[in-house]
Image: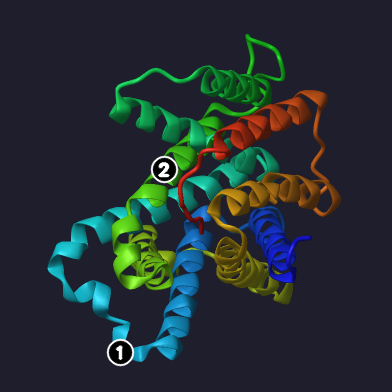
Amino acid sequence: MRSKNYIFGIFITLIGGILWGFSGACGAYLFKFHQVGSDWLVPYRLLLSGILLLIFCLFKNPKTIFNPLKNIYNYPRLLFFALIGLMMTQYSYFYAIELSNPAVATVLQYTAPVFILGLACFYDKRLPSKIEFYALILAAVGVFLLATHGKIDTLALSLKALIFCLISALCVVVYNFAPQKLARVYGIELVLGWGLVIGGVVLALYMQVWNLDGVSRLSGYLALGGVVIFGTVLAFSFYLWGVELIGAPKASMIAAIEPVSAAMFSYFWLNVEFTAYDLIGFIAIMLCVLILSKDKKDEFKC
């Protein structure tokens, strides 16, 4: 029989994945009903989430809060993680949602294992194995169906949305690999907290968020809270908790409920309609993820 901790680990990881999907739906709600854009939302998402995580770290161990910043040799890796792994991942993801919908953007972001596989093959100087090749075919079919609905001469998804979805997937590779050395030394919560704050500050300054229109009604603030608190702080914490209880490979597979969650919230809350091509594309990409997850190394999300 499975222990209670193992069953709880599965449950808490599942909740984390669902909350990630909920985050994307909250972003889409803000874009659709409050006329805010990614330029406004993402800097606040990064900055507020990072501050909350650092407050948590401060209460957990106040003496270590500035440790990652004390060593100047950490700066290149930390900045690379903050600006590419976090800032660009989140901006391209939410901008893709703004241009399409949460389900499509989330599923296409899940093509990240394909890029990770490509990187692994490059470093190992090898070709993909037979099972990996089948996974690549599934990913290609999924992207094709989502982008074209089976019609070669037209795009069902705008080219800009497709490009930003794939940029987001590519940047996911960075935040899977870039912070690992720092995380082993300082802990992932602390590294992620500083990465979010740095990325949030840089993006806020670049976008000049003080000149942009933001939310002004209670429903907008609640949706923003859904993105920051539920979709970032709690989702990430639940996922890490699950990793501790059931291990990273199983946790990462269970967290793949995120695209399903995003699709359900999109359909029932935001009234997004999906075609048969969309559903087949979703299934193809998620099968690719499940195949490639079998040999996954330790990694984390945000």
- Mark 2 residue type: Val
User: Relative to 117, is 165 on the left or the right?
Assistant: right
Cα gap from disc 1 to disc 2, whole angstroms: 31 Å
Circle 1 crowding by C-alpha within 10 Å: few under 14, some 14–19, many from 20: few
Tell me where residue 224 appears, x and y as whole percent. Answer: 62, 68
Position of 72 compared to 98: left or right? left
66 over 74 or under it: above or below: below
Position in image of residue 121 (x %, y %):
37, 26
Q: In the rendered image, which residue does mark 1 sit on?
A: 63
Q: Residue at x 36, y 62 (%)?
A: 199
- Check the image and name the residue furthest to the front: 1
Quarter of the N terminus within the rendering: bottom right
In the image, what residue type sits under mark 1?
Answer: Lys
Q: Is residue 141 visible?
A: yes
The residue at which mark 2 appears reads as 173
Residue 55 position in % (x across, y down): 45, 84
Contact between labelled residues 2 and 1, with CB atoms less than 8 Å apart: no
